[in-house]
Image: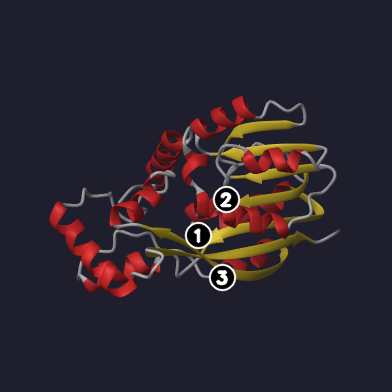
Amino acid sequence: MYNEAELKQRIARQFSKAAEDYDHVAGIQRDIASHAMSLFSPAKKWVMDLGCGTGRISAQLAQQATRVIGVDIAAGMVNVARQRYPFNNLHFEVADAENLPLADSTIDGVFSSMALQWCQPLEKVMQELYRVMKPGARGVLAIMAKGSLAELNQSWLQLAEPAHVNSFEDSHSMCTAAIAAGFDAGVTEKCFTSWHTDIFAVLHSIKDVGAGVLVNHPKQRLSRKQLQRLQACYSEHFAQDKGLPLSYQVTFLEIQKQTE
């Protein structure tokens, strides 16, 4: 099992490796971000995109907000974002969500999609967001929740194998962390499904976006026999006309810092 610093370095390294091709393979992530954007009304002032990745959403926010900062732990992602979106009102920084390079009470709005599931538990992030957000500032945070990747997890359990899948917090825990930090908070949930031709495509849909890091134990190379058994089990229990499904249970956490 990694210590906290090692885990963050590994996450940053894997997402950096995926940066150049990320937008071509991150279809389900794009759908989730689009739904999160439909819930977010950017303040006409200073907005942060937390876990900005390649900067695609940051660039959209920059069309509405006066100033946008995109923050990501992966230097490779930030480098790509800087190259693709050299807007005057858009700035990118490499930083940890639990230690933001911002002064107290400076941000008017926060957007984040498919990033904060890597920060478990959420208490530190929520406290840091509360610190940097102005009174009255709002945020929309799309976070993978308990029940995500259920088909993959259940297939490993059927095979009596260790689950080569990360676990995720439930919506209640996320909302509780936000309220404990001082926010008014509410949650909605939505399930998204990606479809794949075989088990190799399922696994690559996770790995190719940089999300293949296993939090609780070092990743082990799967043998051909394990993959064959996993393919058979997954297909038996979950195959449909559209192929093999992989579900993403997403919590949309809406937060607001109370006015003083």
Residue 212 visible in the displayed image: no
Q: Of marks 3 and 1, which one's residue comes earlier in the chain?
A: 1
Taking 84 as reference, is 162 left or right? left
Percent coordinates x, y for residue 39 in the rendering: 72, 60
Q: Residue furthest front?
A: 241
Q: How is the image coloured?
A: secondary structure
SS label for mark 3: helix
Indicate the quadrant containing the C terminus: top left, top right, bottom left or bottom right: bottom right
Query: Which label sits in the foreground, 3 or 2?
Result: 2
Query: Which label sits in the foreground, 3 or 1?
Result: 3
Q: Quadrant of residue 143?
A: bottom right
Taking 121 as reference, is 221 left or right? left
Q: Mark 3 and mark 1: span between their CA atoms?
A: 12 Å
Q: Amino acid at mark 3?
A: Ser
Q: Of marks 1 and 2, which one's residue comes earlier in the chain?
A: 2
Residue identified by numbered label 3: 171
SS label for mark 1: loop
Percent coordinates x, y for residue 244 in the rendering: 36, 64
Residue 219 visible in the displayed image: yes
Q: Amino acid at mark 2?
A: Arg
Q: Nearer the viewer, residue 137 or 98?
A: 137
Residue identified by numbered label 2: 30
